[in-house]
Amino acid sequence: MIVKERTKPEELEILLALKPRLELEEKVASNLYTLEKGYEGEVQFDKWFTNHRVESLIINDLLLEVNGTLFQIDSFVITQDRLHLFEVKNLEGDYYLDGEKFKTAAGAETKNPLHQLNRAEALLKQLLKNLGFYIPLEPHLVFINPEFTLLQAPVKSPIVLPTQLNRFMKNMNRVSSKLTSKHTKLAEALLSLHIKKSPFSRVPEYDFDGLRKGVICEGCGGFYELHSKSKFICIQCGQLKNIDSSMVQTVKEFQILFPEIKVTTQSVFEWTGGILSKKTIRRILKVNLSYIGEFNRRYYE
């Protein structure tokens, strides 16, 4: 049973909303690519893990602190007599281990994901000890992308390669598991310690006036223009989209980028570059959002 669903990281949501409206610096664009790739891999992992048939508690996206040190967990699975710590990587291409170094086939050294897993394992063990739980912990480094290869992979290691995923799941499903209140208490304890606001966020400075205004095409990131009373058309790829659904998505992006600004007919009119009349915007907001206040003081949530 999933007790904490995976959600798209706030930093990723903000950067995705900024991308078509602001010229991102190279390092910011690189960070966005890394976040997108990582999240895609985690979603792929979740899809694969739906094959897990054993009674368990699954907690995704944990940010924890022990002794003043923060650490992240992609997925944590509680079974009867084992705890499973999963670090998920969405790398593709050929890599190899050179001692403690993790390199591409071309010889370029990159961050060793085993070090990240080992760090999380050590800190999690300390936290579990502090909480008074002594269930054995098994770490797993899962390379989820089918286009990934680890040349000269060690025989004994926590690494799970793409070609080993099916066998790994079969082995997990062979183990019987019956959960008790002890396991539930552990899950509740970890959830209570989860840090919701990540201090690792690297979002560039931006303001309302400095961003491009309009309604963004979800397909290509271009801008829509009015095609008919009910449709937008993308000036870049030609995609047609329902006005109401596009406006709802645009308002969501506005709320992500400017949570401190109230959603009003006027603010949405300005945000969308005046593409629709205020009367139409007011109708869409009233139908799709809850409103507070009356007349000139009305805003939407």
Image (cartoon, rainbow, N blue to C red):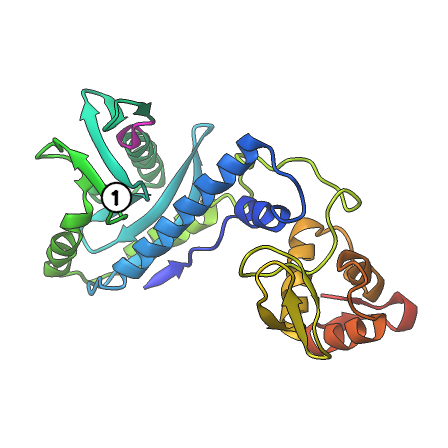
Tell me how many marks there are. 1
Q: Position of residue 34 (x, y in %)?
A: 44, 39
Quadrant showing the N terminus = bottom left
Predominant SS along the magenta part: helix
Image location (x, y in percent) of residue 13 = 56, 50
State whether residue 26 is above or below residue 259.
above
- Taking 168 as reference, is 194 left or right? right
Residue 67 visible, this angle:
yes
In the image, residue 260 sits, relative to residue 117, either above or below, namely below
Q: Is residue 295 above or below residue 214?
A: below
Instruction: Point out the image quarter for the C terminus.
Output: bottom right
Most foreground residue, 91 or 133 = 91
Q: Nearer the viewer, residue 253 or 225?
A: 225
Residue 169 pos. (x, y %): 16, 56
Looking at the image, which residue is at 28% across and 52% down? 77
Specify the segment rendered in magenta. 111-115
Which quadrant of the structure image shows residue 149?
A: top left
Please report the residue visible at 78 percent of the width from the left and 71 percent of the height from the top. 281
Which residue lies at the image location 31% right of the left edge and 22% below the top edge? 109
User: Which x, y percent locates residue 44?
Assistant: 33, 55
Residue 114 inside the magenta-drawn segment: yes
Q: Secondary structure at mark 1?
A: strand
Q: Quadrant of residue 154?
A: top left
Residue 87 sits inside the magenta stretch: no
Indicate whether 38 appears above or below 47. above
For image coordinates 68% across by 56% down, the residue present is 255
The residue that label 1 is drawn on is 143
Taking the image as drawn, is residue 139 in sight?
no
Give left or right: position of 245 versus 285: left
| Mark 1 burial class by Cα count in 10 Å: few <14, some 14-19, many 20+ | many
Q: Quadrant of residue 65?
A: top left
Residue type for callout 1? Phe
